[in-house]
Amino acid sequence: SETKKLLILPGDGIGPEIMREVARIMAWMSRARGINFDITEDLVGGASLAVHGVPIRQEVIDEARAADAVLFGSVGDPKWASAGFDRRPEIAILKLRQELGLFANLRPAKVFDALADASTLKPEVVRGLDIMIVRETVGGIYFGEPRGIETLPDGSRRGINTEVYTTPEIERVARVAFDLARKRDNRVCSVEKCNVMESGLLWKEVVTDLHAREYADVELTHMLADNCAMQLVRNPRQFDVIVTGNLFGDLLSDLASMLTGSLGMLPSATLGAVDANGRRPALYEPIHGSAPDIAGKGQANPLAQILSFAMLLRYSFNMLEDAAMIETAVANVLANGLRTPDIMSPGMAVVGTEVMGEAVVREL
Amino acid sequence: SETKKLLILPGDGIGPEIMREVARIMAWMSRARGINFDITEDLVGGASLAVHGVPIRQEVIDEARAADAVLFGSVGDPKWASAGFDRRPEIAILKLRQELGLFANLRPAKVFDALADASTLKPEVVRGLDIMIVRETVGGIYFGEPRGIETLPDGSRRGINTEVYTTPEIERVARVAFDLARKRDNRVCSVEKCNVMESGLLWKEVVTDLHAREYADVELTHMLADNCAMQLVRNPRQFDVIVTGNLFGDLLSDLASMLTGSLGMLPSATLGAVDANGRRPALYEPIHGSAPDIAGKGQANPLAQILSFAMLLRYSFNMLEDAAMIETAVANVLANGLRTPDIMSPGMAVVGTEVMGEAVVREL
Ligand SMILES: CC(C)[C@H](C(=O)O)[C@@H](O)C(=O)O
Ligand SMILES: CC(C)[C@H](C(=O)O)[C@@H](O)C(=O)O
C-alpha cells in the first residue's frame, strides 16, 4: 500500500504528553495490523516561539502541505501571553488553516454513555447527545480586511475588523454540512444573524439556494445565532448538523462541547478542498487547550487526542474499520471504569495519561 | 412631584397582552400610592408595519426622546419574515437604541429560588445564580460601515459587515459595568476575542487602562468569548458582572438567560448617557420575544414585563422602594405556587396572563 504521510505537531502544554499516547496506538497498528505511517514531527506555538522566535515556520507549513494529514496537539502558553499580537502561539493554527485552505472545521459534540453524568446539564437533557457542528474556518471576521487599530486625530483609537463572506465560501462549507448530514440524521440547521448582518443574510440565501438545487432530500432549518446559543442549552438534542461561520462557530462549538461535560474526550477535524489529484488537506486536533496548569504532570486525558487520530484514519485514509476499533476501545476503557482526573467521578478508578493510553491499546 | 413621562410600546405578539398587566400595576400605584405617570402609547414592529408601512416612525423616536423612559414589549412577527432587510420588525429596537444612544444593555440572569428546577442545568449548578451582563448596544458589527451585499464581476456575491469600536465607546460601557459591580459583588469580567480580533485587543486594553485609572478597587478579569460561552455552562456562578461588545453580548446574554430556565421571568434595561440636564434616556424590555405562537391566547407570562417596569422605577426614577415592592410581590406569587404554562412544574397551579397579573397586584 502507498505510504501514509503524517505531520505531527504536538505544540504546547499537555500536547507532547498526550501525543505520546497516540504514538503508542500507532506502534500497535504497526505490530498488529502491519500499518505504518511516514512521520514528520515539528514545533508550533510557544514551543516554536522559544526555539525559532515565531509561532510557526514556513517550513512547517510546507511539511503540512506535503503530508496527507496533520495531527495537531494544542497551542497556547502563558509565557507568551504578552508577546504581542504578531507572536501569539494561536497564529500557528490560524496560519495552518489559511495556508492549507482548511475551511471546514468538524466539531462533534457527543456524550459518551459512561460520562452522561459529567455534564452540568441534567442527564435526561444530554444523554445520547450527538451533534456535529461544521464551522467555516478560513473566512469571516477572522481574516477579513481592513483590520487593525488606528489612532484618530483627537488621540483616541479605533479597532476595526471586517466580516466578509462570498457565495463560493458559503457554498463549499454548506456542502460539507449537507454531505455529512446524509450520513447522519439528514438534518442541517444553518446559523447566522440575518436580522442584523448582511453577511448573515447572504449566508442564509446561499445555503437556501444550494439546498433547493442539490440537497432537497436533507431537512434544512435556519436559526439566529443568539437563539442557537439558547436552544443548545434548552434542548440540545434537537440538532443534528449545525453549519455556521467562523466567529459564531467558535462560540457555539465550544458551548456545545461543554454540554458533554468532558472536553478531554472531544476530537475535531478541519478539512480543505479536494485537489485535482484527489488529495484533501486535513488537520486533526483535540478541542481542549494546552492546559498549562497540568502540563508535564502525567495527568492529562489523552482520549481526545487519540480520538482525533481515529478521525484522521476515517476522513483522510478511509480506514473506517481501524477508526471504529479505536473508538470502541476508548468506549470500553471508559465502561471499565478508568478515568483521568478531568472526568473522574465517584466509584471510578483514577489513572494518569500513560495508564489510560496503555489501557486503550490493551482493549485493541 | 414632577410628571413622569413614559412611552409605552407594546409591539407584536404577546407584547400588548403582557403590557396590560403592567397597566394593572400602574393603576394600583395610582390608587394606593398616589403615583401617576404621563403615558403615551404607540406602535412599533409588525404592528407599525401593518398600519404605517415602516417598523418605527420618526414620531415614535421623537416621543421616546421626550419621555423619561420607554417601556417596550417585543417585536417580531412571522407575517413580516420575508418583508426584506429594510422592513424587519427588529429595526424598531435597533433604531431606538441608536437614535437615543442607548449604549448599555443590562441583562440580569437570575435564578428565582422557586424556579431553580426549571433550568436544564443541575439545580446545584444554578441555584442562587445572579449574573449581570452589560452589553454594548450602539456600536460594533451591528452598526459599523461599510456593510451590505455586493455583486462581484464574476456574478458571485459578497456580504460585508464591519466591527468598529473606539476608545470612548468602550470606556463608557465599561464604566457602567464597573459602577454596577460596586453595588454588587465588585467583580467584572471583560469578554472579547483579542486573540483573533484587533477590535477585541483594543477593547481589552481600554478596559484595563480605565480599571487602573479609576476602578482599581473592583476585581477585573478578562476572558475570551468562546471560553466565556463554555464557562457559563460549566460554572456560571463564577461570574458577577460581565461586560462585552454588541455581538458577543447578544449570544452570551441569551445563553446566560437560558441557564435560568425561565426566559419569561427576565427583564432588561438599556441606558444612554446622562445629558447636561441630568436626564438619561432609557428603555426597558423583557428579554423574551413576541412569541407569536401563543399570542392572544391569554397564556403569556407577564412577569418579565412587570419586572422590566420595576427596573424602570429603579433606574429611571430612583424609586427603589416601589421597585423592590414589585419584585417581592413577584417572588411571593411564585412562592405561592402560581405558574404560567412556560414555567409550570408538577404540583403548581397553572394560571393565565391576567390571573398572574392580578395575583401580583394582590400581593402588593
Ligand atoms: C486558538 C484560537 C485562535 C481558535 C479560534 O478562535 O478559532 C480556537 O479557539 C479554536 O476554536 O480553534
Ligand atoms: C431583535 C434583535 C435585533 C436583537 C439583537 O440582536 O440585538 C435581540 O436579539 C436582542 O438581543 O435584543
Image (cartoon, coloured by chain):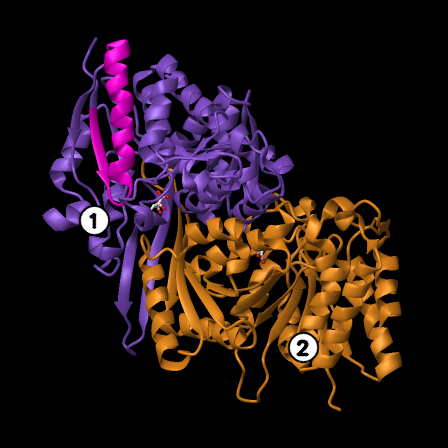
Chain colours: A purple, B orange
> Are the residues under badges 1 and 2 in a single subunit?
no
What residue is disc 1 on?
A46
Is A359 left or right of A236, judged from the image as shown?
A: left
Residue nearest the observer in this picture, A121 or B145: A121
User: Ligand 1 sits in which quadrant?
Assistant: top left
Kind of residue sitting beneath label 1: Gly
Per the image, label 2 sits on a secondary structure element best described as: helix
Taking the image as drawn, is residue A274 in sight?
A: yes
Classify the position of the C terminus of chain B by image quarter: bottom right
Kind of residue at badge 2? Arg
Q: In this view, does B222 lie to the left or right of B250?
A: left
A201 relative to A360, above or below: below
Q: Give the range drawn in magenta.
A: A6-35
Magenta stretch mostly in which secondary structure?
Answer: helix
Q: Is any part of residue A97 visible from this angle?
A: no
Disc assigned to residue B314: 2
Q: Is residue A50 magenta?
A: no
In the displayed structure, does residue A274 sit left or right of residue A263?
left
Q: Residue at x 66, y 48 (%)?
A: B119
